Amino acid sequence: MQDEEILGKAYDSRLMKRLLKYLRPYKWQVAVALGAIVLKAGADILGPYLTKIAIDRYLVKAPGQHSAFDRFLSSDPLVGIAQVAALFIGCLVISFFLEFLQTYFMQWTGQKVMFDLRSQIFRHLQRMHIGFYDKNPVGRLVTRVTSDVDALNEMFTSGVVSIFEDIFVLAGILAIMLNMNWKLALITFAVLPLIGVATKIFRDKVRDSYRRIRVAIARINAYLQEHVSGMVVLQLFNREQRAFDKFSEVNATHMDAFKDAIMAHAVYYPIVEILSSIAIACVIWFGGNDVIRKTASLGILVAFMQYAQRFFRPIQDLSEKYNILQSAMASSERVFKLLDTPVEITSPAVTKTPEGPGRIRFEHVWFAYRNIPIEKANGGPAHSPSSLLPTSLTGGDARLPQPGDPDWVLRDVSFTIEPGETVAIVGHTGAGKTTIISLLMRFYDVQKGAITIDGVDAKDMDVAELRRRFGVVLQDPFLFTGTVEGNIRLGTEWIEDEDVEKAAEDVNLADFIRTLPGGFKEAVHERGSTLSTGQKQLISFARALAHDPSILILDEATSSVDTETEFRVRDALSRMVEGRTSLVIAHRLSTVQRADKIIVMHKGQVREMGTHQQLLAQRGIYYKLYQLQYKDQEMAAAGPQVTASADD
């Protein structure tokens, strides 16, 4: 939430330059809008001046009063007043047309900029490695794409445009008033210091309120996301009232902050109205005396009253636009901070493509999710900021990390997976099994060692090409909103309808799909809420199979299904692994007994490797895991008997 609390400066030239770059593709639309703003400001200023002409030239003739329109106006009062009225109406029509152009083009441009910015943010988020999402809550990232971009859109469409318009109007009124009667102009401007003080107080109050509102909204979003997702747990443990009370507190904070903002507006605008009325009263008093003494004309007095009213409106707007600008600067800083976050997992400039059957090797791989300081990795003290970088980024390798160093998830892991081989990885929770999969697909990069496919380092391959080789079924299946067919195909164009149906047949899912009202076109709601866990898992199996991967990865793929579904899946697995290199991670040893090779992980290290029977005969870690899962069986017999029972 700390990012949400920072407002920063109302104007930052560095940020504004970056923001203006998004306007470059639409520069002619912006130019039309800015031109319309300038012309509209002129048309708005002209109205009171025409009133002065009508009064001084035709209604109450004032000697010595001349205007730039005298040569175009008739000397006949009725005709002249009609001409002035026509000019006034013309100004209104032109002002309407110019405001239409300004509003249309700036709103159009704002939507285009929002589209471009959101597309850029989403594309950047897609390229970020998985470790980035371990440290950044989803709610905060969603806020960057939604609320922060909305704040920038408001600045482009309302803030900047209104500021330019207000400045032009103020400058024009100031020039005309000083030219018409500088004494009355100074009388009108006498209340400006008081308005300035009121504006400063208002701005500070509203700034604090807006900051609190934004923090409260961020907390409401985060709280809602967490507790709606965990609604089952809330209801299971009867925590609805407690959650409601906590939400009410957060909601009340937002309401109180908004009430403070409302109070600031409710006080500020009447104060400005009172001060502007005082200024107009002074103009009437002093200007009226001048009219009586014949030192000023009635037209000038009436025009001054109108100009005074128009003069204070932009001042009110500017105070409000200040907050919009400040909020936009804070939002832009957060957005650019996200966009400037480097993409750590990238394809090299020159990529290599493995040529071979697909042999996978882990060669002395060391990995930690948190960066290991150099003094830990290399055995020496850190003397520079780079000491907080992983060794893969600094090149420091005075000594290999030792098994006793903290934070390492994998420690000197080496093994080979031959083409077409089915390899299972087992071990206790936290042993590093899933980490091996993440490294293989380059969701993370290793700090030490290498992962190669047919002798080519995974870091030297194109990331998309690398991941295209894998078909993955995760422990928690994730389905997108759409259809059953769409969740199997996932937008891959070369997968035909026949391929989707064949994949469903191969995983024993097709019969179930055909019982659905829509068949393969049956709608799937968010996260597959209308399907059982087993059904979602089978769909994810079909998804992996439909993409025809050369390497199949099953990460605890059967842990969340019932026994009957597991038997169906196990039957499907025998067909899925044919002709493919397969890597299976499982807690249930019953699912890995037929593997060509079983790798036993313990505390981030490869402790045992062999077939099911070989590992049982060793009576090591795998044997103990097997005992724990089949403790109801008689395991005290000799090795051959254990093997026989396992074969059963």
Image (tube, helix red, strand yellow):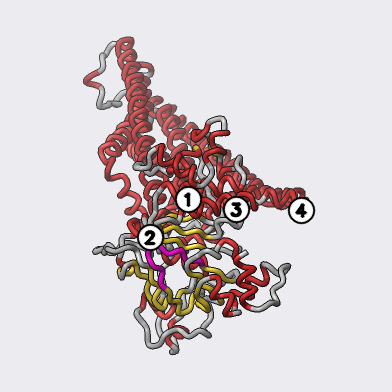
Whichever of callouts 3 and 4 sits on the residue coming sooner in the sequence is 4
- Please give the name of the residue rendered at 43% of the width and 67% of the height, measured from the top-left corner: 439
Q: Which mark is residue 327?
A: 1
Q: Which of marks 3 and 1 is in front?
A: 3
Residue beneath disc 4:
237
Q: Measured from the top left, where is residue 44 in percent x and y? A: 37, 30
Identify the magenta region. Answer: 416-424
Residue visible at 47% across and 78% down? 372
Q: Which of these two is toward me, 410 or 190?
A: 410
**Residue 206, x across and y down, in percent:** 56, 49
Quarter of the picture containing the N terminus is: bottom right
Say which element carries label 3: helix
* Residue underneath mark 2: 340
Residue 357 visible from this viewpoint: yes
Closer to viewer: mark 4 or mark 1: 4
Instruction: Give the distance between the C-alpha atoms of the residues marked 4 and 1, in whole angstroms.
Output: 41 Å
Give the residue pinned by disc 3.
Answer: 566
Furthest residue toward left: 71
**Label 1: how many residues lie within 10 Å, few (<14), some (14-19) or many (20+)?**
many
Q: Which amino acid does label 4 sit on?
A: Phe
The nearer-to-camera label among 2 and 1 is: 2
First in residue order: circle 2 vs circle 1: 1
Q: Which residue lies furthest to the bottom in this view?
A: 380
